[in-house]
Image: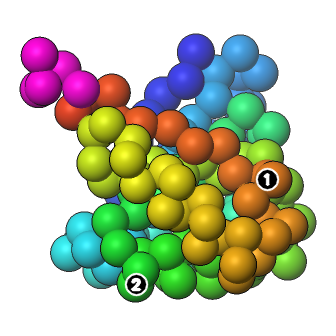
Amino acid sequence: IQIETNGSYLPDELSNQNPNIGWVLDYKLHSSGVTKAMRRFETFAYILNASPNNYIKFVVADESDLKQMLRVCRALLLAGVTGQQFLISPVDAIGSMITTISDKLKNKNNNLINQLVFSVQIHKLFDLV
């Protein structure tokens, strides 16, 4: 079971986290317009280090978001988080940005590209039907 949250709501007691439940926390980037509502960086690092079933998701809309995501990922790696806990979701529902983002990541940080999981925002796909 995975529980997704926008990053402003976080579980209270991670020390007793059920190993069958994982948290997917959105990290709001510049284009979201709500970066001030985000929890402290240390809180994200703590939650990600609490369980390999916890993930951080970045919704990327543009170059500024990509740069911010890279800064956050580097800092999380330094804090002991494994890259396999990083999800990247292009803001477009059809995933056409995946190629653009992966090409830019290969040029900027070739090691990180192998540690990211790409996804699309499924709720937007339903709006297309």
Per the image, the residue denoted by label 1 is: 115
Residue that appears at 73% across and 33% down: 53
Residue 48: tell me if it is visible. Answer: no
Magenta stretch, main secondary structure class = helix
Mark linked to residue 64: 2
Label 1 residue SS: loop
- Horizontal side of 112 relative to 22 (left or right) equals right
Residue 2, image x, y percentages? 55, 24
Residue 81, image x, y percentages? 82, 60
The three-letter code of the residue at mark 2 reads Ser
Between disc 2 and disc 1, whose residue precedes? 2
| Segment colored magenta | 125-129
- Horizontal side of 38 relative to 76 (left or right) equals left
Residue 82 inside the magenta-drawn segment: no
Of the 4 image quadrants, the one containing the N terminus is top right
Of the 4 image quadrants, the one containing the C terminus is top left
The image shows residue 35, relative to residue 129, as above or below, that is below
* Most foreground residue, 41 or 87: 87
The image shows residue 45, relative to residue 36, as above or below, that is above
* Most foreground residue, 78 or 117: 117
Residue 97, image x, y percentages? 41, 55
